[in-house]
Amino acid sequence: MEKQEIRTFGRRHGKKLSTRQQTLIDTVLPALKPTTGDILEIGFGAGEHVRDLARNNPDKIIIGAEPFMNGVASLLSAITDEKSNRILDEYTGIRIWADDVRDFLRETDSKFEQIWVLHPDPWPKARHEKRRLLSAEFLNLLSKYLSENGEIIIGTDHWEYFDWIREQIKSTSLIATIPDMEIIQTRYQHKNKAGTAAPKYLILRNA
């Protein structure tokens, strides 16, 4: 029997979507389904960083993967014209995978310059540790989708999770550095449920 994958994210749906958001899900989202891309963000929340990536990399295809449909709807609302629902010019490079990113990775032959994972759910309770996304197994999977000089960039404000990830890296072939960096703040960073001073970051590269 095939091993069933452990779900690493929480709910798929939150509060009821607005009429416009549902229209965007029904009519715009299907056209943004990705096949290949240059930069991948996993778990983009409301999409603030995906939009920042698109603005700063106008010649790249930016893929955002997010299973929470309210987050997908928020991103769609932000990248489209409010009257026509047309994709705004600065966001035409964005593609959206509205499901588990592992399903997308099984379908794509992309080699990414960057793979971003910002503020993943830390699943702080011991009984939920197996649900943590950034296990050695998942990091090894991501490493196969990096370009020659590609990077996995991880950010979390949950410092115990940060240390846990560093331990997981020891069971991979990836090389880790701890950069001093600042990126656009997302609503999840503003929430800062861990109550720490600032996020910590890791940059991983293939050896």
Image (spheres, grey):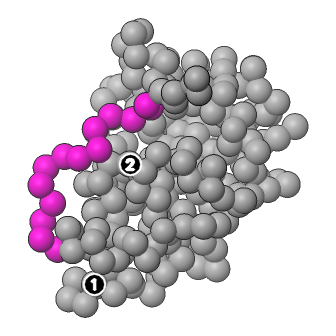
Left or right? Give the position of 144 relative to 61: right
Quarter of the image where one finds residue 17: bottom left
Left or right? Give the position of 118 relative to 37: left
User: In the image, residue 118 lies at what x, y percent?
Assistant: 49, 43
Q: Is residue 184 something that shows in the picture? A: no
Quarter of the image where one finds residue 80: bottom left
User: In the image, residue 90 lies at what x, y percent?
Assistant: 47, 82
Which residue is at a point 32% across and 69% down the rendered structure image?
76
Image quadrant in which the N terminus is located: top right
Q: CA distance from mark 1 to mark 2?
A: 22 Å
Magenta stretch, overall SS:
loop
Which residue is at a point 42% across and 51% down the rendered structure image?
99
On whether residue 12 falls in the magenta region, the answer is: yes
On whether residue 152 falls in the magenta region, the answer is: no
Q: Residue 85 has which mark?
A: 1
Circle 1 or circle 2, nearest the eye = 2
Which residue is at a point 38% across and 48% down the rendered structure image?
67
User: In the image, residue 71 lies at what x, y percent?
Assistant: 31, 55
Q: Amino acid at mark 2?
A: Pro
Q: Nearer the viewer, residue 94 or 141?
A: 141
Number of marks present in the image shown? 2
Left or right? Give the position of 163 relative to 88: right
Tell me which segment is drawn in magenta.
Answer: 7-20
Q: Which residue is mark 2?
A: 67
Q: Residue furthest front?
A: 1
Left or right? Give the position of 33 relative to 154: left
Q: Residue furthest top?
A: 126
Label 1, residues with CA under 10 Å away: few <14, some 14-19, many ≥20: some
